[in-house]
Image (cartoon, rainbow, N blue to C red):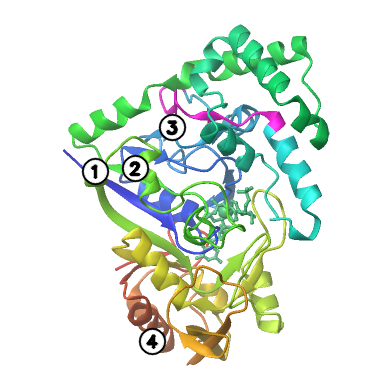
């Protein structure tokens, strides 16, 4: 018997999960996604070549690992078909849960229409139909991957769904699909994806029983979690480690080491509260040096200082055994680095994350910066002040920093 280790985003996504999953995948037999959809954008750099993954797990660059897309994922067929084109011989290397819900082109149209209607209150979604696809699943009107195996019936069911929701679609100006085109599209999906659809619950159970090493790759981040994030400015899935259990069909007892991925500063893409956002030159430098542009939408990411209150909260929610501190090199050259140690809300100082994160004033501590850590591969090579920054993060978040990343490249990683 083995346990499944978890990689989970601790901030608002884009922490560098893809890099760490790819790095660690060399030692794993199976890498699984359990939630989210093609809103995720995980970037991997190996020997100067860039890979951008949205639905395919970041274990794909390790030829030995089997990659699973679990039942908790919302699967956009066009997106995964396009992504698969980057790789050869995927048969037997990727499996899609027969229970994964489909995220079809109309979900994205609904998503974008809702965002338009919200105006100033828009969430700033990726426009990929994630909310509407999960809403259909919870409303019990969604369609699952195994239905792709019978395109004729699925096509009929989708047209029935449109008939039942006619009023809503008219209000949102979402057109009813043309019957012949819909069937043709579903037949194409079946032809491209049919052979990858499997009972992945059984596959994961067997792997656990056979003592195989399993890595679960989170998407998005804890502060975007549907329950524990900055609601309503969140995504529509359980992004915390516990979500990986329902999203794959394993029990809490099957979970092993939980590693929280966290940037040495903070970024957020889309709207919503961000207490440590920095609107000065410092924030601009983080954006420039960190190349903070979204992998999925190309939007610029908002940048700010490390928020130890939010990270402590996220570490507790996920049961993190350790943190992996990413992009430490992006802070190279800063004379002083700020770290948020508490919040002020309505004149009162608090040390926890409240349910409403609007109107928080961050309370900072200043820490001395360093010249350069870029490309460091040994902890002892790090400047003293960088070590002090790491130690302060450990104290404030009550979590050990077990991994430190000093460039986008796989090998520029310190494992303590
Ligand atoms: P994910 O969604 O959590 O997988 O993260 P993204 O891939 O969306 O964003 C992280 C970005 O930071 C990617 O472009 C990575 O190549 C890059 N990156 C990861 N680790 C490091 C690091 O230690 N230093 C620098 N400079 N870039 C990094
Ligand atoms: P990875 O896996 C960062 C954000 C969107 C928006 C909110 C809701 O690459 O870390 P959605 O389309 O999910 O309904 O949008 O969530 N968002 C992400 N931000 N990284 C992601 O994924 C994200 N996936 C969704 O920008 O604010
Ligand atoms: Mg990303």
Element assignment for label 1? helix
Q: Residue at x 31, y 37 (%)?
A: 29
Q: Which residue is mark 1?
A: 254
Query: Which is more N-terminal, label 3 or label 1?
Result: 3
Q: Which residue is mark 3?
A: 71
> From this viewpoint, which residue is outermost toward the left?
1
Element assignment for label 4? helix
Query: Given this view, does label 4 or label 1 mark the residue nearer the observer?
Result: 1
Separation (CA) of disc 3 from disc 2: 10 Å
In the rendered image, the vertical position of residue 261 relative to residue 358, given as above or below: above
Assess disc 2: are there few (<14), some (14-19) or many (≥20) residues with their C-alpha within 10 Å of its C-alpha.
Answer: some
Specify whether 379 is left or right of 343. Answer: left
Q: Please give the label number shown on residue 86.
A: none
In the rendered image, residue 73, in percent from the top left (x then y), is placed at: 49, 37
Assess disc 1: are there few (<14), some (14-19) or many (≥20) residues with their C-alpha within 10 Å of its C-alpha.
Answer: some
Q: Are marks 4 and 1 in contact (CB under 8 Å)?
A: no
Q: Which residue is mark 2?
A: 245
In the rendered image, the vertical position of residue 78 relative to residue 350, given as above or below: above
Query: Given this view, does label 2 or label 4 mark the residue nearer the observer?
Result: 2
């Amino acid at each position: 018997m083995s346990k499944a280790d978890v990689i989970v985003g601790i901030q608002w996504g884009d922490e560098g999960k893809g890099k760490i999953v790819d790095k660690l995948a060399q030692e794993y037999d199976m890498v699984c996604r359990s939630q989210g959809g093609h809103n995720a954008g995980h970037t991997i750099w190996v020997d100067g070549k860039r890979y951008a993954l949205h639905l395919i797990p970041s274990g794909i660059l390790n030829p030995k690992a089997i990659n699973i897309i679990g039942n908790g994922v919302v699967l956009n067929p066009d997106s995964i078909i396009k992504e698969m084109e980057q790789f050869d011989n995927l048969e037997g290397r990727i499996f899609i849960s027969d229970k994964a819900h489909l995220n079809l082109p109309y979900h994205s149209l609904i998503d974008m229409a809702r965002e338009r209607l919200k105006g100033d209150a828009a969430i700033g979604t990726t426009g990929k139909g994630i909310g509407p696809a999960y809403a259909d699943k919870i409303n019990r009107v969604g369609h699952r991957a195994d239905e792709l195996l019978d395109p004729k019936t699925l096509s009929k069911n989708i047209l029935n769904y449109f008939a039942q929701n006619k009023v809503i679609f008219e209000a949102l100006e979402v057109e009813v699909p043309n019957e012949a085109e819909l069937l043709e599209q579903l037949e194409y999906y079946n032809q491209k994806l049919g052979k990858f659809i499997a009972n992945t619950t059984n596959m994961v159970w067997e792997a656990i029983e056979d003592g195989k090493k399993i890595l679960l790759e989170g998407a998005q981040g804890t502060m975007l979690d549907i329950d524990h994030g900055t609601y309503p400015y969140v995504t529509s899935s359980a992004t915390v480690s516990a979500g990986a259990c329902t999203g794959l069909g394993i029990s809490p007892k099957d979970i092993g080491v939980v590693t929280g991925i966290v940037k040495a500063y903070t970024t957020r893409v889309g709207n919503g509260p961000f207490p440590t956002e920095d609107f000065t030159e410092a924030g601009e430098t983080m954006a420039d040096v960190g190349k903070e542009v979204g992998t999925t939408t190309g939007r610029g990411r908002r940048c700010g200082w490390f928020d130890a209150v939010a990270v402590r909260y996220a570490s507790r929610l996920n049961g993190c055994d350790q943190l992996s501190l990413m992009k430490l090199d992006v802070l190279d050259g800063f004379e002083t680095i700020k770290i948020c140690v508490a919040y002020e809300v309505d004149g009162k100082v608090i040390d926890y994350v409240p349910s409403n994160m609007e109107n928080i004033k961050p309370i900072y501590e200043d820490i001395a910066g360093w010249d350069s850590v870029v490309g460091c591969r040994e902890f002892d090579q790090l400047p003293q002040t960088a070590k002090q920054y790491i130690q302060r993060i450990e104290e404030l978040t009550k979590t050990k920093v077990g991994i430190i990343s000093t460039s986008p490249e796989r090998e520029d990683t310190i494992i303590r």
